[in-house]
C-alpha cells in the first residue's frame, strides 16, 4: 500500500485520535485541525472517515503480519522461535494506537471489510507459526503442536497486558527502563519464549 507523506501524516494523527476517542467519538474536522489541513483534502485523499479507518486498518495489519525474513535465517529451531516471538511483540509495542484500533474493531464487527482483514491476518500468522513448529519437528527439537493454540497463547498474553496496562504500571517492580513500553516488551517476550518453548519441547502425551 503506497501512501504519500501527507496521507501518512493524516493516518498517524487519525489513528491516535481513533485509539483515544473511538471511531464514533472522532470527527473529520478534529483530524483536519490536528493535521492543519482542510476537511475537503481529507475527503479527497480518503473519500470518507470510514475509508480513512479502513486504510489505517489495512496499513496496520500489514505491520502486524509475521515476516519470515525476520527469523527464518536462524538455523537453530529455538533461536528461530525466539526471534519470531521478538518480532511479534515488537511490532505491536511499536504501533500501540493501531493495535488499540484493531482490537476495538475486532470486538464490535460493524464493518465487514474489517472482519475479512482480521481473518486474513490470523490465517497468515498461524501459517507462519506452523512453519516454525514444523521446522523444529523436522530438526527433532519440537514436538508437534497445534499452531492455532500457540497463536492464541501469543495474542492472549499480549492482549491481557494491554488491557491491564494501568495495573501493571503500578504493580510491576521498577526496572532500568525509563520507557514502560520497553519494559513491558521485555516481560512479554521473556514470558512467551519460556511458555512456548516449554510447550513445544515437552513430550506430548
Image: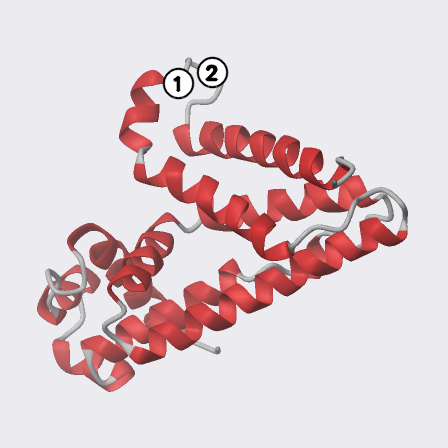
Frontmost of labels 1 and 2 is 1
Residue 12 percent across, percent down from the top left: 32, 60
Crowd tier of the residue under label 1, counting other residues whose Cα lies within 10 Å: few below 14, some 14–19, many 20 or above: few
**CA gap, disc 1 to disc 2?**
9 Å
Q: Which residue has dot 1 on it?
A: 172
Q: Which residue has dot 2 on it?
A: 175
Identity of the residue drawn at 76% across and 46% down? 80
Seen from the viewer's position, the closer of residues 36 and 25 is: 25
Q: Which mark is residue 156?
A: none
Identity of the residue drawn at 77% across and 40% down? 79
Left or right of 123? Residue 168 is left
- The quadrant of the picture occupied by the C terminus is top right
Please say if 2 is above or below 133.
below
Residue at the front extreme of this rendering: 205
Please say if 138 is above or below 85.
below
Q: How many marks are shown on the rendered structure?
A: 2
Is disc 1 in contact with disc 2, using a CB cutoff of under 8 Å?
Answer: yes
Please say if 161 is above or below 68.
above
Residue 24 position by quadrant: bottom left
Identity of the residue drawn at 20% across and 50% down? 20
Left or right of 78? Residue 194 is left
Q: Secondary structure at mark 2?
A: loop
Residue 78 percent across, percent down from the top left: 78, 40
Residue 11 percent across, percent down from the top left: 31, 66
Amino acid at each position: 500500500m503506497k501512501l504519500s507523506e501527507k496521507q501518512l501524516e493524516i493516518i498517524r494523527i487519525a489513528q491516535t485520535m481513533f485509539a483515544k476517542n473511538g471511531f464514533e467519538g472522532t470527527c473529520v474536522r478534529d483530524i483536519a485541525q490536528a493535521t492543519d489541513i482542510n476537511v475537503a483534502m481529507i475527503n479527497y485523499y480518503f473519500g470518507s472517515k470510514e475509508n480513512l479507518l479502513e486504510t489505517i486498518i489495512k496499513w496496520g495489519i500489514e505491520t502486524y503480519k509475521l515476516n519470515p525474513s525476520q527469523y527464518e535465517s536462524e538455523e537453530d529451531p529455538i533461536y528461530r522461535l525466539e526471534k519470531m516471538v521478538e518480532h511479534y511483540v515488537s511490532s505491536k509495542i511499536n504501533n500501540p494506537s493501531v493495535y488499540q484500533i484493531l482490537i476495538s474493531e475486532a470486538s464490535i464487527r460493524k464493518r465487514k471489510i474489517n472482519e475479512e482483514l482480521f481473518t486474513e491476518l490470523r490465517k497468515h500468522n498461524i501459517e507462519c507459526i506452523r512453519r516454525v513448529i514444523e521446522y523444529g519437528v523436522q530438526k527433532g527439537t519440537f514436538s508437534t503442536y497445534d499452531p492455532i493454540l500457540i497463536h492464541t497463547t501469543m495474542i492472549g498474553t499480549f492482549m491481557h497486558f494491554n488491557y491491564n496496562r494501568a495495573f501493571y504500571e503500578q504493580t510491576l517492580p521498577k526496572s532500568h527502563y525509563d520507557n514502560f513500553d520497553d519494559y513491558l516488551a521485555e516481560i512479554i517476550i521473556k514470558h512467551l519464549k519460556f511458555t512456548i518453548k516449554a510447550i513445544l519441547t515437552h513430550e506430548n502425551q
